[in-house]
Image: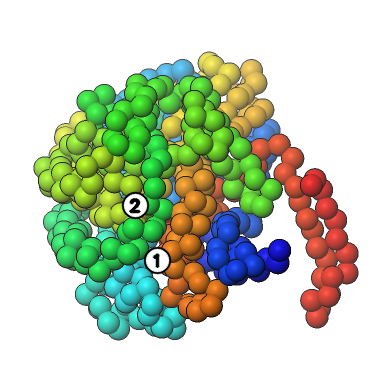
Amino acid sequence: MSERRIVIDPVTRIEGHARVTVYLDDSGQVRDARLHVTQFRAFEKLCEGRPFTEMPSLMARICGICPVSHLIASAKACDQILGTRIPPAAVQLRRVLNLAQLLQSHALNFFHLSGPDLLLGMDAEPARRNLFGMIESHPEMARDGIRLRQFGQQIIERLAGKRIHPAWVVPGGVSEPLAPEARDAILAGIPEARAIVQRALNWFKSAIERFREEAAAFANFPTLFLGLVGEDGELEHYDGHVRVVDAAGRIVADNLAPERYRDYIGEAVEPDSYLKSPYYKPEGYPDGIYRVGPLARLNIADRCGTRGSDQEWAEFRQLERGAVLSSFYYHYARLVEMLYALERIEQLLEDRQILSRHVRAHAAANHPEGIGVAEAPRGLLIHHYRVDEAGVVQWANLIIATGHNNLAMNRGILQAARRFVHADRLSEGALNRVEAVIRAFDPCLSCSTHAVGRMPLVIELRGPTGQLLDEVKRGA
C-alpha cells in the first residue's frame, strides 16, 4: 500500500514553530494527522544551580506573550519554599496582574491571530487573510483589538514597571505597592475596554451560524475538561482547587489539591514532537485526554462571579446540554473571560486594601520543595522546584498550559482533515481549516516544549544547495 503526505510547514498565526503532516492512504483518504512541535528549549535544566529566589524573573523569560503567567506560577512555588503567608494586598495585586495578562493574550488571539479567519472567512485569499486585510475590511474591529491588547499591557506596566518580562512578582509577594494614581488610571480605562469586548461578543454571537461546519469539525468530540475553580465553584485563575468534568458536564473529580498534581496528571512523550502529552492518570494514556484553557474553565465552573460575565456564561452554556465540546468555541470563551477579567479587575481595584504598603513577606528557604499552580490564558500552568539546604534549585518540572491540550489538538486536526481535506480536490481553504483548529487552542509552543527522558533526536547537516552531508540519530 502506498502512502502520500501533505505537509503544512509552518503552521501560521500561532506563537512558536510547528508543522502538520496529513497522511493519506492509497485511496486518497486521510489516515492520520499529526502536529509536530519542532523547537526545543530545555528550561527545566537551565533552572538547575540557580537560587530559587531568582526563579520568577528567570521564568518570565520563557515567553514574551505570557510572561506574567510564569511569574505567578513560579512565585507561588517559591512562596511554598519560603513557607510563609504572603500579605493579602500582594495576593490581590497578583490577581490583577494575572487577569491583565489574560486580557491582552486573549485579545491577541481573537482579534489578530484568529480574527482573519473569522472576519474574512476560512477560504479568503491568503495574501489578504491577515491583519492588514482586517484593517482594510473591518477597520473598527482591527482598532478595537489593538486598543484592548494595549490596555491589558498598560495595566501590567502600571503595576509591574514594564509590559514584558517584569520582575515585580517575587517570592513572598510583590516588590512594590500599587500607587493610587496608577489604580485610578486603570479604573478610568475599564469602561472603554468593556465596550470593546461587548461589541466583539455581540458580533461573534451574530456570526456563529456562518461557522456551523467548522464548529462541527474543530476538535468536536468528548473529552474531560480540567482546571481551577474557587471554593464556591466560581471561575478562578489564581488559586482554588482542581476540578475535572466529563463531556456531559458531570463532575468526575473535585477538590483535587493542585500541589498533588502528580497523583492525577501523567506526562508522556511522542517521538515526533518536542511537546509533552499530559494525560489524566485514572484513564491512562492516551485515553486520559482532557482539555484546559478558556473553554475548559467555562465548562467546569458553576458561574463566573461578576454580573456581566455571568450573563454571558449562562448564554454560552446554552450551546449544548452538557459541556460545550467544540474547540471552535474557545473563541467565544475567550470573549466571556475578557469581560470577566475587566469586571474582576474593577472589583479588586475598588477594594482599598489593595493600596496597602505591606506587600511582601521575607523569609529564608524553609522547605525543600515548592509547587506553584495558576491558570495561564491557555490553561493550567504548573511550576515544581526542589532545592537544597542553601535554596539552590536541584530539579525542576514544568507543565505548560499548551501541553495539556496536545492530545486534543492532535485528535482535532485529524477530525478536521478527514472533514475538509480531499486528495482529489485539495484546496488552500481546507488546509487553512486544519491550521485554524490549532489556532482555536491558541497554543504557545515556544514556552511549551519540554521533554521527559531521552527523546529520539535527528540532526542533519546540509550543504548550501540542500544536499544531505551527514546525519546523527539518537533513539528509534
Q: Would you place residue 262 above or below residue 321 in this image?
A: above
- Residue 167 rendering spot, x and y as whole percentages: 46, 44
Please give left or right for residue 298 compared with residue 385 in the image: left
Q: Which residue is mark 2?
A: 326
Residue 242 visible in the displayed image: yes
* Residue found at x 34% / y 32%: 245
Q: Are marks 1 and 2 in contact (CB under 8 Å)?
A: no
- Residue 267 rendering spot, x and y as whole percentages: 58, 35
Q: Would you place residue 457 above or below residue 422 in this image?
A: above
Count the numbered circles shown.
Answer: 2
* Residue found at x 55% / y 66%: 29
- Residue 189 rendering spot, x and y as whole percentages: 18, 57
- Residue 123 rendering spot, x and y as whole percentages: 38, 77
Q: How is the image coloured?
A: rainbow
Q: Which residue is mark 1?
A: 113
Neighbours of disc 2 within 10 Å: few (<14), some (14-19), many (20+): many
CA–CA distance in space, label 1 to label 2: 19 Å
Dot 1 lies on which element? helix
Please give left or right for residue 138 compared with residue 222 in the image: left
